[in-house]
Image (tube, grey):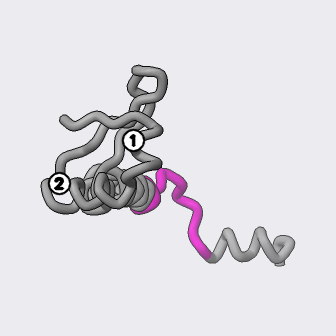
Amino acid sequence: MKQVNALQLRQSMGKVVEGILRTGEPVILEKGRKPVAVLISIKDFEERFVEKAAAEARQALLAEIETLSRVSSDTTSSVDILREARGGI
C-alpha cells in the first residue's frame, strides 16, 4: 500500500488522486511518520460505509416491522377500545 506524507500530498494531490483512480489502491497519509488517515476511492467508500449503513438501517426497520406485526396478547375488542376512548359512551 502506498504511503505519502502531508507535504507530498499537498505538492502532488492530483497525482495521488490519479493513482487511486487508476489502481483502486488505498493510500496511507502520514504525519510525522505516523499513519493518520487513509485515502480511498469513492467506490470503495460507498461499498464499505454507505451501503453498510443502509443495510444496517434496513435490518433495524425490518426488526421494528417484525415487532409491530406480532399478534397482541390484549383481547380487548376494537369497539371496547373506541368506547373507552370516547369516555364510556
Tag on residue 8?
A: 1
Q: Amino acid at mark 2?
A: Gly
Crowding at dot 2, Cα within 10 Å, few <14 / some 14-19 / many 20+, comes out as some
- Residue lying at the far right in this picture: please name it: 87
Q: Residue at coordinates 39% horizontally, 26% vertically from top-left?
A: 35
Q: Is residue 80 left or right of residue 50?
A: right
Query: Badge 1, how many Cα within 10 Å: few under 14, some, many 20+?
Result: few
Q: Quadrant of residue 78?
A: bottom right
Q: Position of residue 6 (x, y in %)?
A: 46, 38
Q: Which of the pair 4/75 is nearer the observer?
A: 4
Q: Main secondary structure of the magenta part?
A: loop
Q: Is residue 74 magenta?
A: yes
Closer to us: 75 or 17: 17
Residue 30 visible? The answer is yes
Residue type highlighted by circle 1: Gln
Alpha carbon of mark 1 to alpha carbon of mark 2: how far?
A: 19 Å
- Pointer 2 residue: 24
Q: Residue at x 30, y 52 (%)?
A: 16
Instruction: Tell me the magenta residue range.
Output: 66-78
Between marks 1 and 2 in the image, the one whose residue lies nearer the viewer = 1
Q: Which type of secondary structure does the marked residue at label 2 adopt?
A: loop
- Left or right of 68? Residue 66 is left
**Which picture quadrant has residue 43?**
bottom left
Furthest-left residue in view? 23
Name the spot of residue 2 as percent of width and height, x first. 22, 37
Which of 72 and 47 lies nearest the eye of the viewer? 47
Tell me which residue sits at (23%, 54%) in the image: 20
Whole-percent x and y of residue 63? 38, 53
Q: Are marks 1 and 2 in contact (CB under 8 Å)?
A: no
Which is nearer the eye, 46 or 10? 10
Please provide percent x and percent y for residue 76: 58, 62
Mark nearer the N terminus (1 vs 2): 1
